[in-house]
Amino acid sequence: MSTQQYEGQAAGQANWPNGIAPYNSPIPMARTHLGHALVSEWTKIRTVRSTVWTLSVMFVLVVGIGLLTAMALSGDDYTGMPLLSSGLFGLMLGQLCVITLGVLVVTSEYGTGMIRTTLTACPQRGRVLLAKAVVFFVLAFVMTTLACTLTALINSALLSDQTRPSYVSDSNFGGSFEGGKLVASGGEWLGATVGAGLYVALLGLLSLAVGALLRHSAGAITTMMGVVLLPLVMALFMAGEALKDVRDFLLEYSPLNGLASLYRIPMTEDQDATGWPLLGGLAVVTLIILGVAYALLHKRDV
Amino acid sequence: MIELEDLTKRYGDKLAVDGLSFTVRPGTVTGFLGPNGAGKSTTMRMVLGLDAPTRGDVRIEGKHYGELREPLNSIGALLEAKGVHGGRRAYDHLLCLAQSNGIPERRVGEVLEMVGLQEVARKRPKGFSLGMGQRLGIAAALLGDPRILMFDEPVNGLDPEGIHWIRNLMQQLAREGRTVFVSSHLMSEMAQTAEHLVVIGQGKLLADTSMSQFIAENSRTHVRVRTPEPERMRDVLVEAGLRPVTGGDGALEVDGGEAPRIGELAAANGVVLHELSTQRASLEEAFMRLTAQSVEYHAYAPGADGTQLPQTPPGAAPPPGGAAPPPQPGQAPPAWGEDWKRGR
Ligand SMILES: Nc1ncnc2c1ncn2[C@@H]1O[C@H](COP(=O)(O)OP(=O)(O)O)[C@@H](O)[C@H]1O
Ligand SMILES: [Mg+2]
């Protein structure tokens, strides 16, 4: 644009039919890579209200319900539940927020048309999906784990002084006592904090993949609510001996059972379930659906 | 430079784009004209690699869109449907795009200023007027200071001031040596902006020519003469070798005649004139005639009955940009780029 630039161009103008040399930007350009996409997706996720809302509500539900339950049970006779288990109730609701956010990370781009801008800026579609997945997963994992850990600490502070009725022995219950106080093992702590955080973040990632498949907020959220709640609801309606096998199957592989098992209150008769195998299964399913979404993303028009 | 070769897109039964081949060159504004539904937006989405062509190929600077390493530096686009999340502040919207291409953050402030949105940088686009939304889209297109710019119906819904601004912007970008490709369904709009013209109808190429040639070929100029003595005037004109026709309201229409000469003829022969004016058929009419022909053409089996192609055969374009004004260093505004060059 400057005079100097035009003088420079004069020499080479024979190549151009109208005497104007092609424009060259003075801005330094970088060859783009995954790092750029990650930074960009981080900016995106932190600059919309839905992120702030869903994560705040999740936090309030998990910690608030955890606190209320703990206060209600505190000082009473031992209920027979493991020390950290009451964190589950808040998280059962809180996970729905994470699912919603996971879906919105992708579908809000389709709903607003932002996806076209995004893919124009970064035509490597797989890179965009990967960056979204990583940024969302890390954020969801950190936030959920924080909320769960806080709840576990509250539970352990308020509930460890529950009195054990003299007529029961240690072995009758899920929890264990040490020196007259209810305590949680290392495994229980891990399950109720990192385990629960991982499990819910994985559910959120699955939602993100489903969102990328369906490209529609309401459709994807409804689908995920169905996946999480339906197996349990169906099992509840399956009375009678004939359906016992189906009912047991639904209960065991219900996503809620995985979470409950991490809190050591599984829904099946298998009282030793830790939830980790179910978490592994969820991870496999999530990766498969994400793979399908990845393949379809390259095929479809946007 | 954008090169299209036999570019075709089919949606189900609908052939939206049908074997388009043309080249958009740097240094001029190329208008992409066609009635609604002609396939302009679809073509532009294929240029950006958003929709995959059913057949054919499109390349940007010789590459497919997916092969571009710094896409925002190669091409900036404003699409028809606003590609903006209404809940993300204008500044953040541009920031995330800049980051995805490794563009320094201070460029965001620069483009906001260029489009005049610095006041609302911290506002959410949900509440923006049509014009502000369009400016935000243009800011995003300018972010990578690209060599190619593509605008899909940029003036739709803008007020006269906004339209004027966009026209000047496009012409300035072309003067800087960039490729500017802009679509519209309004001939009048194109006539004021573009130097080169690509016309499509029903997905097919109808014309690829310079604007001046299009005007010369497609607009009929005639002189209109009204007189109380039409019979005498007609004789005078015929004697002078002209071919007057009687128009609908009794006035004489002289094709290819020049008003001064006709006036002199009338004076020399003592004919009283009530009106003497040069009439130029509007470009809009020429455009409608051209696209109407494409509809007609489609109504017959191609070639089966010797149906003629439209007057302007595809590819009959003169060397592009013949009418491009030379760069005018004296008029160029101060270059913001100096700053970036020093910083490199
Ligand atoms: N995604 C799509 N699915 C089906 N038909 C489409 C799609 N996009 C465009 N079309 C059709 O293709 C034709 C061209 O549309 P478009 O490119 O938007 O035209 P223009 O931009 O010139 O008005 C129209 O008939 C339109 O209905
Ligand atoms: Mg259009």
Image (tube, rainbow, N blue to C red):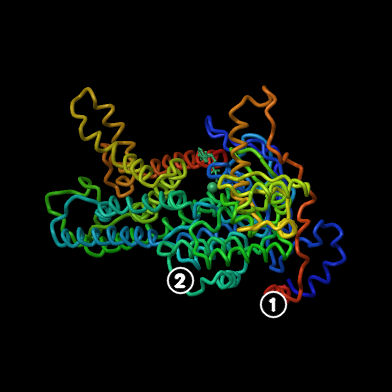
Left or right position of A259 against A3: left
Badge 2 element: loop
Q: Which mark is residue B122?
A: 2
* Above/below status of B240 relative to A242: below
At horizontal 50% and vertical 63% (from top left) the residue drawn is B93
Q: Which label sits on residue B16? A: none
Q: Position of residue A208 (x, y in %)?
A: 44, 47
A142 vs B332, nearest the viewer: B332
State which chain disc 1 sits on: B
- Residue B213 lies, in percent from the top left, at 73, 50
Quarter of the image for the C terminus of chain B: give it: bottom right
Q: Which residue is at the front of the view, A274 or B64?
A: B64
Above or below residue B9? Residue B177 is below
Q: Residues within 10 Å of mark 1 (few under 14, many from 20)?
A: few
Quadrant of residue B129 in the image? bottom left
Q: Position of residue A77 (x, y in %)?
A: 13, 56
* Amino acid on which disc 2 is placed: Arg
Q: Amino acid at mark 1?
A: Pro
Question: In front: B261, or B310?
Answer: B261
Q: Is residue B1 visible?
A: no
Q: Nearer the viewer, residue A189 or B242?
A: B242
Residue A239 sits above or below residue A124 on the image: above
Report helix, strand or loop for mark 1.
loop
Residue tagged by mark 1? Answer: B334
Identify the residue shown where x is 34% and y is 36%: A253
Report how many numbered discs are placed on residues in the image.
Answer: 2
